Amino acid sequence: MFRSHRRLLTATSASLLVLGLTACGGGTTKDSADSTGGGATQPGASANPNAELKSGLKIAYLPKQLNNPYSDVETGGGKVAVGELKGEYKLVGPNDASASSQVSYINTLIQQQQDVIVVAANDPNAVCPSLNQARQAGIKVVSFDSDASKDCRDAFINQATTQGIGESLTKMASELAGGEGEIAILSATPNATNQNAWIDVMKKELAKPEYSKLKLVKTAYGNDDDQKSFQEAQGLLQSYPNLKVIVSPTTVGIAAASRYVSSSNYKGKVAITGLGLPNQMRQYVKDGTVKKFALWNPADIGYLAAFAGAALASGQITGAEGEKFKAGKLGEYTIGAAGEIVLGPPTEFTAENIDQFNF
Amino acid sequence: MTAVATHSPARKVFSGLVKIRELGIIVALAALIIYTTTSQPRFLSAQSIRDILLNTAILAVMAAGQAVVVITRNIDLSVGSVLGISAFTVASMMSDNPGLPMIVALLVGLAVGALAGLLNGVLVRYGRVPALVVTLGTMYIFRGLIYSWAGGDQVNADELPGHFLQFANDSILGIPWLVLIALVVVGGVSLMMRNYRVGRELYAMGSSPGAAELAGIKVARNMLAAFIISGALAGLAGVLFASRFGTIDASAGNGYELNVVAAVVVGGVAVSGGSGTVWGAGLGALLLTVIGSALTVLDINQFWQQAIVGALIVLAICADRIVAVRIARSLRKRDSHV
Amino acid sequence: MSDASVSPRSFRGGLGKLASWDGIIILLTVVVIVAASLGVPNFGTSRNFTFLILDLMPIVLVALPMTLIIVTGEIDLSVASILGLASSLMGWFWNNGLSIETIIPLVIVIGAVLGAINGFLVNALGLPSLAVTIGTLALYRGLAFVVLGDGAVADFPFDYTGWVTGTIGGGSVPNVLIPIVALAIVFGIVLHATPFGRSLYAIGANDQAAHFAGIRVARTKFWLYVASGAVAALVGILWTLRYSSARADNGSGLELAVVAAVLLGGVSIFGGKGNLPGVLAGVVLLAALQNALRLQDVSGQALNIVTGTLLVLSVLLPNIVSSIRTSRQRRKLRQAATS
């Protein structure tokens, strides 16, 4: 029935031998490689702060994925801004947030000769070669929400400073725990850039004397997947019976954790806080599961990105530190280090003010 | 079917071995639960058991339907997409008409799923297109339909009526509704497959499609029934999904088909048709869910979960093969005595 | 099959050609490409050609061994997971200081071994390939996550990443067309011009008969799985270099797209029927449609519906045509009998 064992063995050992030989021969390794060769350098145009904003600009938004309510709000703000700029708004994107799925869309936008691409990168490196091709074709690239590598975009709209968010999360957790007890974090994916940076700040904050009675027992990862987050919240409460607060710095995680707690006998005993969307959280704020949570206005991110893109495409700014531009109703912004533009401080939502927000 | 003396030794060996197959899952389950509980006693707390059973319910309902289709030597890969269509249909219906009672939601879900199953069955039977091709195709088509209908829309928990969401948390005599539905579905379909004529005919069709046709079994009607059952149960699962998770978008149930097939295969239903039980598939669903929860509680790297499930599937198929070889041998032995 | 002897009338020959699905699909592919070049702005440019080839590269490469496997009546659903595991391993080896020149052959050999495990389970133990490869689909993808977790490795040398996304001599022919054409020729010759290839059709038509005709069925199929694993690993490497990002979730879901393309190309899921030109046309058709629709700002969702419908039609239409033909013949025979 099956007589090829010996041949298979011969073949395998032969190939292993070949491998051994190549391994001895050296070659390109991580240490010897020059991996920075891909970065495209923009022509050194200088900024003209007095340049008029061009009208009729084609501005395309490429969020992480299409069916995501959070990015819908962001791009909704973008649509308003493009309207104010008298440009052409376009929204494209993949159905899944995988690393590679955005590349084909960037290629299509290059073919369609857009003026500005506003992108939330699923993977900071996977989109890089395509974004650089776009920039070589004269398209301005603004990243928002989740940054692409610094050398393949012109500017990055940062929702808030990492420090500000980490501090605000720690403060809310401490208030809800009554200043002492066990807390846990329910994050997105283990390698999510934003969440990890905020968690790092939280850890530094917790080391301060005023938070010395708070104990961070575990950081769990719900992968920004509703069900997974739901189950991770279950797991946290099972493993840590004395848990007082779950801090979830992601909209998917906080909604899932709130839903679990509001439907279990932990309701009222464990507090949930973090970053969430008012529309998703309204129910849990009203039923008392959630006392307070925070977020910036995502619509403003998309809005600011459109104005930054238009300012770049009109030659008002080049993305260098210190340049200033006006962003419609949001007022004037100054570009920070490495092309970063910070939106502003986050808003705290409670039962009192939540009905004023609809996103 | 030929009349086999019911007390023949081969029959005994046969049923014994089949029992061993489901016993294997139960032993594995028990071992896993005991091990996990010794290192984290709260694993067996009332809340934890409730959570595991609730998580199993949706998968078990779909696995029961899939088992019926697989027993007829077919497969239904469209169940994840059918779940999505049903969940989104029912969720938008309930958010537009908050006054509708839960039973309407359940019936609409069943109907949507049954319609999808009917389409699959007709294409398989009357179009003479292999089930794998049909359901792979309709998996894409149904998912595409939800995306083009829903787009980026999402039905949030706060748009759904309270009684609809409450359904997933309510219980009767201490048993949550979801678990009760899953038990009724798995038990009912098991009974149908085991004790009723149509069930035995489905087994016969899976063992030997040609012989079943020659024996006068209404193959066309039965095959449509099998696909309608699978579709309807996926539709029902969609309603349960919407009620339990509250947040429904176009990607609901994406990729579920592989979990469902995995549960069925781990539960001892052979993909070559004609053998396995529906309650075995239900046990398979339970085992997969318990593995997931145990890994979380034991704090084992979650990345191992998928690898373990994969290894388990391969192991289950090997076990089935061994059982089949033994049965064949014992049958041969019996024949030589005659 | 048997009806060729019933009536030699010429229209039946024409209908027969039309009914051969791979003929239709090749024609359809040409029509779509011509129509898109004329009607869709920016479709017929050389840069778009490069993008198109890059986009279809993973599917077309994996489809080559998959075609051979499906011709024998088996299936391999684990290919995308082998791709992901290869990508993970590549990142892990790279992080551990191995040179890229070592990593590439090493990963391909590991891919072949993963394929050999499938081949062993299916052919030595006689297990159903659909179930086995659903199992290894989960297993290999799981191992990919075990190796690299949720992280990504990105700092591959530009010499390699640039080659994969680059074009021959800076023109409009992408470099990856070289492996695509080379492997397509190799697999084409093996399937259509060797005794080995003919034995695959024999196995697919009736493996018992093939066995009695002296074909080593199990061994033959075993090597197809090895080839499938090796090619999937190669695609894992190309994928990683194209996106300069080694990740465990790379290529997930690709298996269904590949199977869809192969079946669309006229290969029968029951084995014994189909050819490579049809499959290549199937892949190009799907990729060109996707590309053209995207340029027209039609969302990817619509493409799901098109793919699924084409897939079902690819089997349904020939069936309908043949049943019409059969009923016509019956009528003819009846007429002949009464007259």
Image: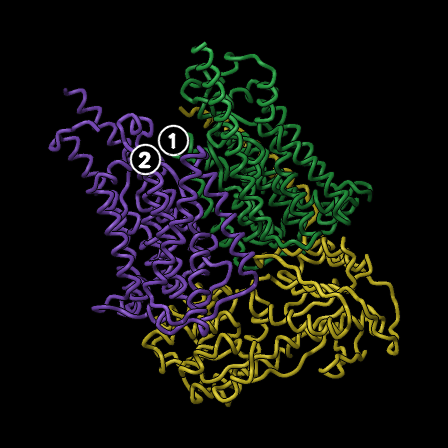
Chain colours: A yellow, B purple, C green
Residue C126 is tagged as 1
Q: Chain of mark 1?
A: C
Inspect this view and state whether residue B318 appears: no
Residue type at mark 2?
Arg
- Does C69 sit above or below residue B85? above
Nearest to the observer: residue A319 or residue C314: C314
A47 lies left or right of B184: right
Nearest to the observer: residue B223 or residue C221: B223
Q: Residues within 10 Å of mark 1 (few under 14, many from 20)?
A: some
Inspect this view and state whether residue A206 appears: yes
Residue drawn at x 33%, y 36% is B273
C60 lies left or right of A231: right
- Does A157 sit above or below residue B198? below
x, y percent for residue B100: 37, 68
Q: Which residue is mark 2?
A: B321
Distance of label 1 from label 2 (alpha carbons): 8 Å
Residue type at mark 1?
Gly
